[in-house]
Every structure is written in structure tokens, then in C-alpha cells.
Image (cartoon, rainbow, N blue to C red):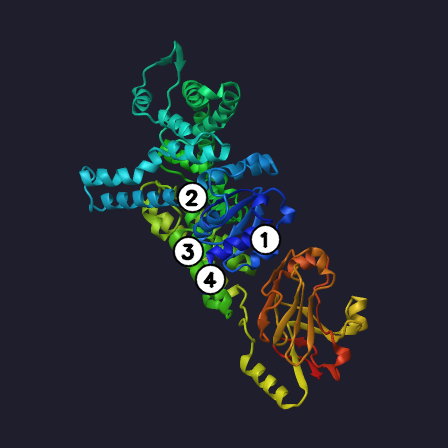
Amino acid sequence: MATVNYRSLAEGILQEVGGEDNIVSATHCATRLRLKLRDESKADKAAVEKLPGVITVMKAGGQFQVVVGNNVPTVYAELGKITKLTGDDTAGADDGPKGSLFNQFIGLISSIFSPMLWPLAGAGLFKAFITMAVQFGWLNAESQTRTILAAAADSIFYFLPIFLAVTVARRFKTNQFTSMAIAGALVYPTVVGLSRAGEPVSFLGLPVVMMNYTSSVIPIIVAVWLQGYLERFLNRVIPSAFRNFSTPLLVLLVMVPFILMTVGPVTTFAAQSVSNGINSIFSFAPWLAGAIVGGFYQVFVLFGLHWGLVPIMVNDFATQGYTLLYGPLLPSVLAQAAATLAVLFRTSSATRREVAGPAALSGFLAGITEPAIYGVNLPLKKPFYFGGIGGLVGGAIAGAGGSAATSFVFPSLLSLPAYGQVGNFAMQLIGTGAAIVIGFTLTFFFGPREAPDAVAAAPADAATLTSASEEAGSVEVLAPVDGQAVALADVSDKVFASGAMGKGLGIVPTDGNIYAPISGTVKAAMKTGHAYGIKSPEGVEVLVHIGIDTVQLEGHGFQPAVTRGDQVNAGDLLAVVDLDIVANAGYDPTTLMLITNTAQLTDVVPVAEGTVTHGQPAVTVQV
């Protein structure tokens, strides 16, 4: 795979989204650079998708999400070197468009958890391996070695409110050290001791319902949100001579008792109620709940909606030590990885294999499916569906066995030790294995079999071009797509049919891959991805126009593979079009291939008839 220059990538993204002034905030998760834009119309989505290193671009959760893959932290770091977007002086969240309440909630959760996602996953896996070592007798549960290792693995979870205080403070623009002090009070050993003692507690004579806030999520989020209002009020009314020390003092004086007496108990009870509701569904029909989660979780990932489940999972770990939501997630993730692996073995496209190999590995070993989804399975459609079927069946089996994880881990083969303590581990393994087999088998036998990226029949094309060169002044122009050839006069567009734009032919495509019909320089590449102009060394100018009036789709369903100025060889991939999107929008998918400088040439003769395959001679040109 070609080496990506991440500084150039960061600069390219910055330029194509309208510059730093158009970005309200920048965060990242496991695979996506998440940008909140002031004006989305200034962002060129197609141009960003063409940048080397970008898998795809999504608009979801009120964010412009650039899917990069596992190297997104590097891109984020490079963005921080050339902008102020990754520091504390980022513009406030209120500067951009609000979006729906649901989108705001998803954006809030993703921005809070994204910076600590990998440490949480690493620590969770660490905990799982410690547990496995104890279970197999490799480590004495009472030993000091185990205590030290457990401290290293557990600290981020035990003191989670303090870690969250940092990211929440950045989100709500509060003093992060004051926010950390509030969180520290919630997990202060003496306060934790009061909650465990079970005795009545009062503050200034008022009763306090004590809760255990270690590993909690919601209380500190609400606390810091309220802190922001109090801080801004105090900063307005307190004279500057006293403001620097008196504002934190008053915030702590007011907020800590207030949170312990009101917000803490209310939010904790609310979170527990949501968790209990989900657990009741698993208790009532565990196989059905598992099927729903396993079958549709990757759809949630598509739109970034999976972030909404994170607080529920974390709360489950804090209150009951496990979460049933995790059981079906493992089959869901590995089924997509298996479908991607099948594509790796099945496809003849070197470009697709280049993406599929690392993407499958990422899914199996790291539990990250975005590269597999966006780079392989979703563009090909069927592998994504087959992976969903595998996740549904495997999730139902795992759910029926009551399987759950006891650590916050990314569902992967490496995280299996986290599933060994709750529920039927054998059922978890059976469900996961079934998901892998279904995803792989269905994709391998029934998935699309792509042709090579270069000329589909390289020896034949080479012979054709050789014979053409031997015939003085003759150039063969190849079919750009698989399908049914139609005479130019029979196409539905009167301008094309009249020959006013040059002689050629139409092809009703049966495949969405569009290839270069001739070697030369790309002179035109529409931003919408529906049309390309190529000029050969012999001076032949060829237009490949995908569909009739498809410019109206504004690029929806089109994935360009080349840009203006690129050098291409006959058979190189020009673009990928989703024919279902074109058809569902009511447009004619007929792809036109025209020799636009026909008038300057000796003769142009269409030779393709009936069923054609890309790479076979379609038009003979006499220069």
C-alpha cells in the first residue's frame, strides 16, 4: 500500500472543508476525524474522498466525518500542528449549527469519549488478560503482583469521572482543573466510604442520598455542564481583582454539595433504570435482543449512532460488573471482518485487495470495522448484507446463552478473555463462529466477483493495441463498462443521439465499475463523478458520460477514482457508480462513450454489438 503523507492529508482536508475558519471543532474516534462545520456547503465531500489515505466521508450526528482508519490519531496530530483546532482554544460548540437534539447528544457523547477511547480499550483488554491469568492459575489472585497489575488496569475505570471531567470541560468550555476537582470529590475515598457504610448522611442538616460514583459517567457530565453556567455568571459579577481564585472557590463550594444531594442520585437512578430496561429485554427474549443488536449494530456504526450505547455499557460495568450488550457485538464485528476476508480471496481487483487485507485484520484483531465497511463491504453491498446476516444469527446464539463482557474492550478475537465469566461462554464461541462462517461463506460464494483493476483481459487488450499500432493511423477505443451495447441514435438523450457531441455508442451497464477506454491524460473529471474526458497521445478525445442527466444527483452514488491531470492506461478504473441509486432516482444509467473530436478525425466506427465486456474493442478510430 502506498505511503500516506499525513501532514499533506491534514492540509488537504483543511483546504477542502473551507479552511480553519469554517471548522467549529475537531475530534476523532477510533477511525474517523470528526469535524463540526459552520457552513457545510463550503465543504467539498468528493474532493476530500479523493485525498490519499481517506476511505470515505460521512455526514452524520451533525458532523463531517472523514474516515481514515487506524491512523486517524496521526492525522489529528498533524492537524493540531497546523491549526489551533485540537487545543483548548477551539471555538465553542455553540458557534455551529445545532441540528436535532438526538444529533447533539450523539455529538456530545462522541466528543467526550473519543480522546480516551484507545486507553479505555487497552485497559479493558489488560483487565481481561489479568482475569484469564487468574482463572488458569497463572497468577495468584491474592498476590501483590496481581494487586499492582490490577491497579494499572483498573485506574482509568475507577477514576473515570476525573478523566471524563477533562474532555467534558473542553466540550463545555469550563475550567478543566475545577471540573477535575469536582470529579475528585465524587470519588474521594471518604465519600466513597460514606456510600458503602449505609448509614444516614447529612449536609448542614439536610439529608444526602449517598451513591458510589467510582466508574460513573452521567453525574460528572451533568455536573460540568452546570458548572459552565455558574462559572460564566461568577466571572461576570466578581471583580477582576478577586475573580481568579474566588470563582473556583465558589464553584467547588456550591457544586460539590449540590451534585451529591441532587444531580448525582437522580442521574445515577436514571442511568440504572435505562440499564435495567435493556437487561429486562435480554431477560424476556435474550435470543431476540441478541439478534437485533448483532444484526443492526454495524448499521449504527455507519451513522455514528453506536456512541449512544457507550454510556449504557460503561454504567453496566460500574453497577453490575458486566454488560449483556457486548455479547452480540462480537459476532456482529467478526461477521463483517469475515465478509471482508472473503472479498480478499474472491476479488480480482488489486486495489480492493489492498484495502480488504488490512481491513479484515483490523476487524478480527482490533474490533474496528469502519475500514472494512466503508472501504470494502458497503461499496460492494452484498458483503455488508451477508455480514449483517452473520451478526444476526451469531448475536441470537450469544444472546440466548446470556453471554456478556466484564471489561470495556473492542470486540475482537483478542478480547475473548473478557467474555469468560458471565453467561455461557460456549454459546458465545458458537455464536461467534457461526457469524464468521456465515459472513465468509455467503460472501465467498454469492458476493460480487470484481474484475482486475487494469485491463480485464490484459493479454487480449495488449494484442489489440499492438495490432492497432501496426495498422497505421488506427486506434481502438475499448468498452468502458460491462453491459449491453446500444446505437448512439437509440439513446434517450436527443443531444447525444444526434451525434452533435461526436460519434460513439451507448452501453446499458450491468456493473458499476467504469474503466478508461483509452490510454492518455484525464482532461476533464466532473466533481459530481458522472463524466470524464481523456485525450490519447494520438490526439483522440474520448468522453465517458455515466448515465443520462445524472449530474442532477450531485455526485450521490458516484465514487471517482481519478482527477483532472491524471495519466491513465486503458482499463484503469475511472469511477464506481451505484446503479441502484441511479435507477431509484429515476435516471437512465446508459453510459455514453463519445469521440468528441470526431470532426478532426478521418473516421469513427462503432464496432461493439450486443453484450460487451469492458476492455473489448468498441470503437475504431482512423486518425
**Residue located beneath label 1 in the image:** 16
Is residue 318 positioned above or below 39 on the image?
above
The spot of residue 147 in percent (x, y) is 22, 37
- For this view, does 393 lie left or right of residue 134? right
- Say what amino acid the circle numbered 2 marks: Gly
Task: Tell me if label 4 and label 1 are in contact, CB under 8 Å.
Answer: no
- Say what amino acid the circle numbered 4 marks: Ala
Q: Is the residue marked by circle 3 packed among few (<14), some (14-19), or many (20+) residues within 10 Å?
A: many
Q: For the residue labelled by badge 2, is the local secondary structure a helix, a strand or a loop?
A: helix
- Say what amino acid the circle numbered 3 marks: Ser
Q: Earlier in the sequence, mark 3 or mark 2?
A: 3
The spot of residue 205 in percent (x, y) is 39, 9
* Residue name at image x 32 percent, y 16 percent: 199
- For this view, does 389 lie left or right of residue 99? left
CA distance for labels 2 and 4: 29 Å
Q: Is any atom of residue 226 visible in this view?
A: yes
Out of 335 and 350, give the one closest to the viewer.
350
Q: Earlier in the sequence, mark 4 or mark 1?
A: 1
Q: Is the residue marked by circle 1 packed among few (<14), some (14-19), or many (20+) residues within 10 Å?
A: some
**Residue located beneath label 3 in the image:** 362
Task: Tell me if label 1 and label 2 are in contact, CB under 8 Å.
Answer: no
Q: Earlier in the sequence, mark 1 or mark 2?
A: 1
**Residue located beneath label 4 in the image:** 356
Q: Is the residue marked by circle 2 packed among few (<14), some (14-19), or many (20+) residues within 10 Å?
A: many
Q: Earlier in the sequence, mark 2 or mark 4?
A: 4
Q: Quadrant of the N terminus?
A: bottom left
Tell me the mark number nearer the camera, choosing from 3 and 1.
1
The spot of residue 23 in percent (x, y) is 56, 44
**Residue located beneath label 2 in the image:** 399
CA distance for labels 4 and 1: 27 Å
